[in-house]
Amino acid sequence: MNNKNGLSRISIDIPKIQHKKLKRLAAELGVSMRQIVLEALELVEECKYGNHEPNEETIKAIEEVKARKKLIKAENAEDLFEKLGI
């Protein structure tokens, strides 16, 4: 550990394709690879330990699906997106 500024250095081996993805994502977002790794760690902790309770809109949608109400039929993904307006 570098006591001067409270930082530790790590070295990890990852597949080249994942390394390229990490570099590309960092460049696209204009951040460092370090920032992406640190944010990913925070998200994993939040997801693992967070309270994931659905909101009212999600609860209503789940209930409608279970009751088979307001279902949209589509021929394919493109047709579905068009019907949903997205």
Image (cartoon, grey):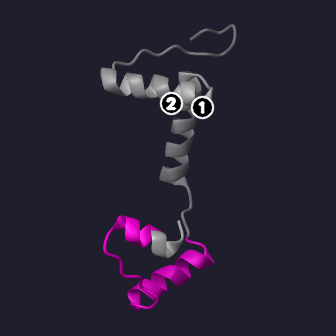
Residue type for callout 1: Leu
Question: Relative to the observer, which residue lies in front, 63 or 20?
Answer: 20
Q: Start and end of the magenta stretch?
A: 54-81
On the question of residue 43 being in view, the answer is: yes
Image check: 14 left or right of 44?
left
| Residue identified by numbered label 2 | 25
Q: Is residue 28 left or right of residue 10?
A: right
Marks 2/1: CA–CA distance: 6 Å
Q: Amino acid at mark 2?
A: Leu
Residue under the image location 65 percent in, 9 percent down: 3
- Quick one: quadrant of the N terminus? top right
Going by the picture, which residue comes out furthest to the right? Answer: 5
Q: Name above or below for residue 13 compared with residue 35.
A: above
Image quadrant assignment for residue 5: top right
Tag 1 secondary structure = helix
Q: Answer yes or no: do the residues labelled 2 and 1 have beta carbons within 8 Å?
A: yes
Measuring from the top left, give residue 23's x and y in whole percent: 47, 22
Q: Which mark is drawn over residue 15?
A: none
The residue singled out by tag 1 in the image is 29
- Is residue 14 among what the camera can see? no
Image height check: is 1 above or below 31? above
